[in-house]
Image (spheres, rainbow, N blue to C red):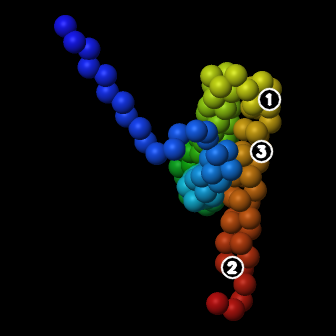
Amino acid sequence: MTAIHILLQAGNVTGVNMTEVSSAIDQFVNQIGVPALQITLIAGGLSFIVSIIMLILHFIEYLWHPTSFGRTSALTEAIFHAKKPIYGALGIFLSIYISLLTIGLESGNPTLVHNAGTYALWLLQAMLRETANALAYMIKQALSTTP
């Protein structure tokens, strides 16, 4: 029996240049991570705006409906739609928190494990802030006298 030895060599493999690795990570975060976070904030903000608009519309229907059973139904729908943004915010917070906590536990990063709730709250606050800004802008445009 003869043993066959295969030697593969891929260039000069004397060490890893950490500046190149750091640059690649920064480039990845700037080109993919930041736009993905902005899209997530916009999508979450739009879903909150739609929930708030539906709440307002059902409340207006409650005030103007000519029959008592119609007002009761509209009020029930208004309450139902009022719960959606609250549950949505709670769901977003928990999903971000659980994701960060899992990443921190798997990577052995105690700082991420300790601050997962804070980071999740910061992201949720940013989403709600973006939603409030967009809603305020839409109301300002709707109330302005010039187009």
Amino acid type shown at disc 2: Gln
Amino acid type shown at disc 3: Trp
Amino acid type shown at disc 1: Thr
Q: Residue furthest front?
A: 2
* Residue 55 as seen in the image, left or right of residue 130: left
Q: Which mark is residue 122?
A: 3
Q: Which residue is mark 2?
A: 141
Q: Which residue is mark 1?
A: 111
* In the image, residue 72 above or below residue 65: above
* Most foreground residue, 78 or 107: 107
C-alpha separation, residue under disc 3 versus residue under disc 2: 28 Å
The answer to whether any part of residue 58 appears in the image is no
* Residue 121 as seen in the image, left or right of residue 11: right
Q: Residue drawn at (31%, 22%), measured in percent from left and top?
A: 5
Q: Nearer the viewer, mark 2 or mark 1?
A: 1
Q: Residue furthest top?
A: 1
- Locate the N terminus by quadrant: top left
Q: Residue drawn at (67%, 32%), measured in percent from left and top?
A: 100
* Most foreground residue, 13 or 41: 13
